[in-house]
Image (spheres, rainbow, N blue to C red):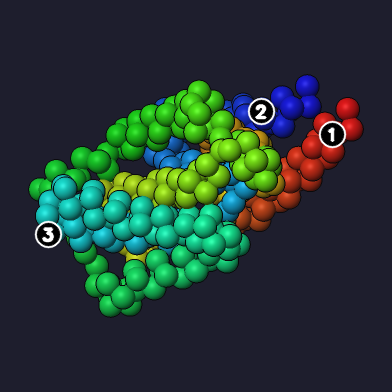
Amino acid sequence: MIAAIQRHGALVVLVVLLAAGGLMFRTFLTAYTLGNLAVQASFLAMIALGMTLVIISGGIDLSVGSVYALAGVLAAYGSTRWGLAGALILPLVVSGVIGLIQGTLIARLRMAPFIVTLCGLLFARGLLQLITSEGSTTYLVPAGSAFRWLGDGTVLVVIAVVAYLAGGVVLQRTPFGMRLFAVGGNEDAASLMGLPVARTKISVYVISGLLAGFAGVMSAAQLGSGVTVIGVGLELNAIAAVVIGGTMLTGGAGAVSGTLAGVALLFVIQELINQLGRFNSNMQAVVSGAVLVVVVVLQTLLSRARRQR
């Protein structure tokens, strides 16, 4: 019972808020409103998916917001030089390499994930400023580029849904997923069992980098340009969604379905605040922060209750 509450609490709260919003506002549960929310949430959803895997493994990735922004700029730049292939390959290669370097430093040299990924955040943001001349250069996706189709709202949502279905299968039905839980639960025990701990940890940071990079690609396709100021603080939203979804920051437990519910919950709260129309845009951050504090406290209490049973 306690474990079920921990896993599905975000989904229950989400359903309650959707019902409340539908009763309060006639336009809240319309296909138009929910469709817009789904499109807006698709970028954070992709990033939070990778963050879920990292946190389950016992790590953290603070670089995803900057990698997201960098990949968007690289995608726009690549589309102007090499078309669709450049728009996809260039940002994903760079994002994957950043994840690989971070994972190697964490897994092989046993450096703290917080410090390594904070450096990755600064590096990606600095590289972004370098290639855009400190934000003064904006790369535009050509109007007739085939890359533009990726920015269609329906395509974005479908990609996010497929990614979560694949992520759920990987976590629950594959040896890699089982190793991920084992490493996050007790790294020393996993090593004694002969599991490839270092390779597993490197893999999740590569996956996190690739997913953040692909989210940036999706953003560039939708906006039609590489925007340099996006992604600031996005890593905190991703962590919030993961934790709200029931994944423990201590690692070893979690589910992608909970993360998806956490992402949806953040955007539903934002939309409810917008519908009320009495608060400024900063109120969404205040409410989200308050929700996160409550969730973390409840998770801590639930975890203690499970250990005492």
Image disc number at residue 81: 3
> Image point 47% across, 29% down: which residue?
170
* Residue 33 percent location from the top left of the image: 44, 35
Element on which disc 2 rests: helix
Q: Residues within 10 Å of mark 2 (few under 14, many from 20)?
A: some
For the N terminus, the quadrant is: top right
Q: Label 1, on which residue?
A: 307
Image disc number at residue 8: 2
Q: Residues within 10 Å of mark 1 (few under 14, many from 20)?
A: few
> Image point 34% across, 61% down: which residue?
70
3D distance between C-alphas at marks 3 and 2: 46 Å
Closer to the eye: label 1 or 2: 1
Q: Can residue 32 be seen here? A: no
Which quadrant of the structure image shows residue 252? Answer: top right
3D distance between C-alphas at marks 1 and 3: 57 Å
- Mark earlier in primary sequence (3, 2): 2
For the C terminus, the quadrant is: top right
Amino acid type for the residue under numbered disc 1: Arg
Element on which disc 1 rests: helix
Q: Is residue 19 above or below residue 235?
A: above
Amino acid type for the residue under numbered disc 2: His
Closer to the eye: label 1 or 3: 1
- Mark earlier in primary sequence (1, 3): 3
* Residue 182 percent location from the top left of the image: 62, 36
3D distance between C-alphas at marks 1 and 2: 19 Å
Using the image as rendered, state which of residue 209 and residue 45 is in the foreground: 209
Q: Is residue 296 left or right of residue 138?
A: right
Element on which disc 3 rests: helix
Looking at the rendered structure, the number of numbered marks drawn on it comes to 3
- Mark earlier in primary sequence (1, 2): 2
> Image point 50% across, 23% down: which residue?
173
Q: Are marks 3 and 2 in contact (CB under 8 Å)?
A: no
